[in-house]
Image (spheres, rainbow, N blue to C red):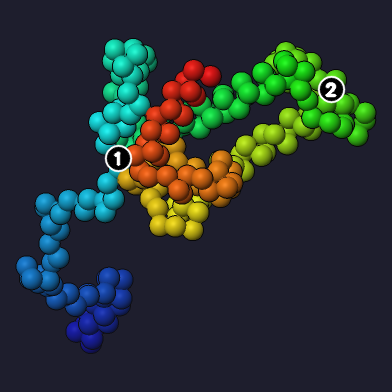
């Protein structure tokens, strides 16, 4: 009787003990299963294009009249060849704008102006002052916005045509080996296609003259 009583007490006490979990199997990781990370990754491949070099850009136009290369701000020492190609492309385009502005200022100063009205409110082209800043102030705000939008569209489409090809022909972007300053918008600067009849030597001389005249303007 005492034995049965002791056995029942032990069985009831075992209910409060945590269950015993079976031992988990040991996972063995082989060296072959672990993916090794290469310690020395292969260097990135070089680009397939070659931008025009700094020496080629600085070789034209010749600046014999100054006795050295025309670079008063020493911009040629900044960045890579792509940076200098972008600088030259911007210089040519700003030179064109400066030459157009000078031509317009000279024509208005000589008394020439477009016929008709500038606005529907009765502002005539002849009413625009001859002075540059005064003429800009006389233009209504909507006219200034239209000019800025037109300039932005020219810039935007120039980049598009530079990337896709020059006027339907195979060409390279000015940062990918092409000639900086070359206009890519069809019919904008050469609507009659006169440049297509010139040799490479004549085109190079024309670019040099254009850069010098743009700097002068």
Q: Quadrant of the N terminus?
A: bottom left
Mark nearer the viewer, 1 or 2: 2
Residue 31 visible? The answer is yes
Identify which residue, 5 or 215, lies in the foreground.
215
Residue lying at 57% horizontally and 47% vertically, measured from the top left:
192
Query: Residue 157: where, in percent of width, then height?
Result: 56, 47
Identify which residue, 132 or 187, lies in the foreground.
187
For residue 52, which numbered disc appears in the image? 1
Query: Residue 25: where, in percent of width, then height?
Result: 14, 76
Residue 185 visible? The answer is no
Residue lying at 56% horizontally and 25% vertically, measured from the top left:
99
The reply to whether callout 1 and callout 2 are in contact (CB within 8 Å) is no
Q: Is residue 56 left or right of residue 169?
A: left
Query: Residue 68: where, in percent of width, then height?
Result: 28, 15
Which residue is denoted by mark 2 in the rendering? 126
Q: CA distance from mark 1 to mark 2?
A: 47 Å
Q: Residues within 10 Å of mark 1 (few under 14, many from 20)?
A: some
Residue lying at 76% horizontally and 22% vertically, measured from the top left:
112
Of the image marks 1 and 2, the number of the one nearer the N terminus: 1
For residue 71, which numbered disc appears in the image? none
Q: Residues within 10 Å of mark 2 (few under 14, many from 20)?
A: some
Q: Secondary structure at mark 1?
A: loop
Q: Is residue 36 left or right of residue 61?
A: left
Q: Is residue 7 left or right of residue 85?
A: left
Query: Residue 162: where, in percent of width, then height?
Result: 46, 49
- The answer to which image quadrant residue 209 occupies is top left
Report the number of numbered marks.
Answer: 2
Residue 194 in the image: above or below residue 125: below
Quick one: which residue is furthest to the left in this view? 31
Q: Secondary structure at mark 2?
A: helix
- The answer to which image quadrant residue 56 occupies is top left
């Amino acid at each position: 009787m005492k034995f049965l009583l002791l056995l029942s007490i032990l069985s009831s006490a075992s209910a409060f003990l945590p269950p015993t979990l079976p031992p988990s199997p040991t996972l063995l990781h082989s060296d072959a299963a672990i993916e090794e990370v290469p310690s020395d990754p292969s260097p990135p491949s070089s680009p397939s294009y070659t931008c025009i070099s700094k020496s080629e850009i600085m070789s034209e136009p010749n600046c014999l009249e100054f006795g050295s290369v025309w670079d008063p701000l020493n911009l040629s020492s900044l960045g890579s060849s792509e940076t200098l190609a972008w600088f030259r492309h911007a210089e040519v385009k700003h030179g064109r704008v400066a030459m157009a502005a000078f031509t317009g200022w000279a024509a208005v100063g000589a008394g020439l102006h477009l016929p008709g009205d500038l606005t529907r409110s009765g502002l005539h082209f002849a009413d625009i002052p001859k002075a540059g800043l005064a003429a800009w102030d006389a233009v209504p705000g909507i006219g200034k916005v239209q000019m800025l939008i037109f300039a932005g569209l020219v810039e935007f489409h120039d980049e598009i045509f530079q990337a896709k090809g020059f006027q339907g022909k195979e060409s390279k972007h000015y940062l990918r080996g092409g000639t900086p300053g070359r206009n890519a918008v069809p019919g904008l600067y050469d609507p009659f296609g006169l440049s297509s009849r010139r040799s490479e030597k004549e085109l190079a001389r024309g670019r040099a003259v254009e850069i010098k005249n743009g700097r002068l303007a």
